[in-house]
Amino acid sequence: MASRPQDPTPREAARELANSLKAHAVTLFGMLAAMWAIELIDFLLPFWHLDHYGIRPRQASGLLGIPLAPFLHGDFGHLAANSLPFLILGGIVMLGERGVFWAVTVFVTVVGGFGVWLLAPAKTVHLGASGLIFGYLGFLLSRGIFERSFLWIAIALALLIAYGSMIFGVFPGTPGISWQGHLFGFGAGILAAWAMFPKNRKLYRKS
């Protein structure tokens, strides 16, 4: 005799969905609140020079900036410009469960940040959540390909329409903008999708 777990009732399913959405919102808005709180502290206590703790290429002390850079911003305008894309793209990444979100966030922060530290010009400081945002975009644009999922390919096409112009941010252009952070973040996002969804690679090896 075989047995299987009883399917949840509609009320239980609705409660589970509500709890999941609440947890997702707490995670995203909690991270964003931390960014705003840090920027407020930097504004009120400028002598702390928090922006100095961004990524400083090829300086040993600059390695500390890899985990800190996404939470540091040049000013409130910089942070405001990053806030909505962070919520939207981060929220879409989180549709694949919070575990996926955290894995992508950590991977992009570390790998993309290390790329900036290793290869960006010396005597510069790189900060802001845009590298992480570009990582989310790279992950979302490539996930459907590596996972062979029509749903995620459709999401990628919608994102190309809405955010496709962002991709030009990985090229040198506007002075004062860390295009290296964008480039390495975007590449790290693609690499994260490749590492997390190897189904396509397995099929190629069998053929």
Image: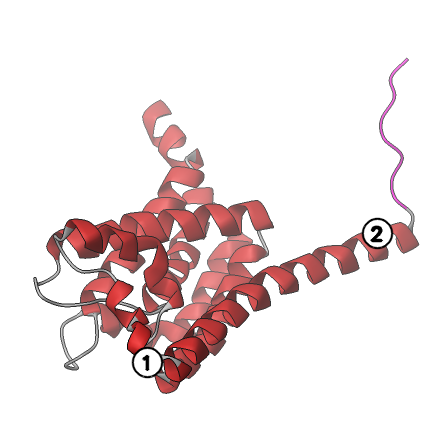
Residue 48 lies, in percent from the top left, at: 32, 73
Residue 68 lies, in percent from the top left, at: 35, 59
* Residue 199 in the image: above or below residue 163: above
Q: Magenta stretch: residue 170 in it?
A: no
User: Which residue is identified by label 1?
Assistant: 46
Highlighted range, magenta: 1-8
Instruction: Give whichever of 93, 29 is nearer the camera.
Output: 29
**Category of crowding for the residue at label 1, using alpha-carbon neighbours closer than 10 angstroms: few (below 14), some (14–19), many (at least 20):** few
Residue 127 lies, in percent from the top left, at: 28, 68
Instruction: Give whichever of 164, 89 is nearer the camera.
Output: 89
Residue at 64%, 65% (x, y): give it: 25
* Residue 107 in the image: above or below residue 36: above
Which badge, 2 or 1, is on the more N-terminal residue? 2
- Side of 96 where 62 appears, left or right: left
- Side of 182 where 35 appears, left or right: right
User: In the structure shown, which secondary structural element does the residue marked by tag 1 occupy?
Assistant: helix
Specify the label residue 13 is tagged with.
2
Residue at 20%, 52% (x, y): give it: 61
Q: Amino acid at mark 2?
A: Ala
Q: Is the N terminus in the top left, top right, bottom left or bottom right quadrant?
A: top right
Any part of residue 141 in sight: yes
Q: Is the C terminus in the top left, top right, bottom left or bottom right quadrant?
A: top left
Q: Amino acid at mark 1?
A: Pro
Instruction: Give whichever of 14, 54 is nearer the camera.
Output: 54
**Category of crowding for the residue at label 2, using alpha-carbon neighbours closer than 10 angstroms: few (below 14), some (14–19), many (at least 20):** few
Q: Magenta stretch: residue 5 in it?
A: yes
User: In the structure shown, which secondary structural element does the residue marked by tag 2 occupy?
Assistant: helix
The kind of secondary structure the magenta stretch mainly shows is loop
Residue 171 lies, in percent from the top left, at: 17, 70
Closest to the camera, between mark 2 and mark 1, is 1
Residue at 92%, 48% (x, y): give it: 9
